[in-house]
Image (cartoon, rainbow, N blue to C red):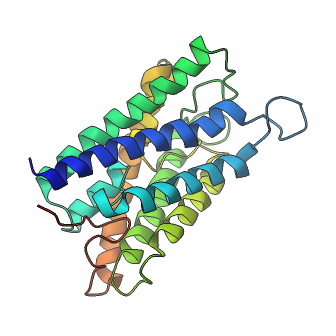
Amino acid sequence: MSTRLSRALIAEFVGTFLLVFLAVGAAVFGISAVVGADGNGPGTGVVGVALAFGLVLLGIAYAFGPISGAHVNPAVTLAMLLGRRLPAGEAAGYWVVQFLGAIAGAAMLKLFVDSFGVTDYTGALGTNSYDNGAINLAGAFVLEALLTAAFVLVILLVTERVAAPGFAGIAIGLSLTLVHLVGIPLTGTSVNPARSLGPALMEGGVAMQQVWLFILAPLVGAGIAVVVWMFTRTQEEMPEGQVAGSVREEA
């Protein structure tokens, strides 16, 4: 294994860990049923949690983008693979460490809730769900596929050469914020199989029974994004080493 790939895999593990612990943690530690009205928790609400996901990814993109591309999401990695922007062997490694990082992040959240006296304001460790009174199974699948397709399409387009260099991370972070604003009231928003599997494994029960949808639908969405990108893309990609979506070549 090359030094470059080793560094990339470490970056993906740490980045996915941070995404789950910090962003899902914003929901677990702070969301309340009615923001600021019931006196429970800091009251970050839907907007606060959506911003947490976007801001965490923004930081990860600029910190780890030059190292690994800052995918921190198996759906993004699948899109890069299908778009021939990442070799299959490297994609497999990315998937392994992304899921491991998400599980580690969720385990840390579980530790805070079970052992450190922290209240879980989501009641389910920030897991995703359907048939929850807000949306049914079919609706959740279509929603997650569409939200993921929109998010991944932004990534594919802004990491091309014609995009303003250095601003890709901002567009990607804002896009993740937007899809969370739409999806949180319905499914809790996945758009990331690793983000869903980690908390589901720690929570168990219904979360594990339903997690298949939040793994499969984002992957379908990534495939849709690649098809659209192929018809709308430019012919040039962003230079190697730019944030989010490409990997710096090193020995």
Horizontal side of residue 105 vs 1, given as left or right: right
Q: How many marks?
A: 0
Residue positioned 53% across, 21% down in the render:
110
Name which quarter of the figure residue 4 lies in: bottom left
Q: Residue 137 at x, y = what percent?
A: 51, 40
In the image: residue 171, left or right of residue 193: right
- Frontmost residue, 136 versus 55: 55
In the rendered image, the vertical position of residue 153 relative to residue 36, given as above or below? below
- The residue shown at (39%, 58%) is 221
Q: Quick check: 89 left or right of 45?
A: left
Asked if residue 208 can be seen in this view, the reply is: no
Front residue of this view, candidates 166 and 84: 166
Above or below — where is 219 with respect to 20?
below
With respect to residue 205, does 180 lie above or below? below
Give the residue drawn at x 41%, y 76%. Answer: 158
Residue closest to the eye, 224 or 97: 97
Q: Is residue 34 left or right of residue 192?
A: right
User: Residue 23, position in %: x, y?
Assistant: 57, 43
Which image quarter holds the C terminus? bottom left
Instruction: State whether residue 208 is above or below residue 224.
Output: above
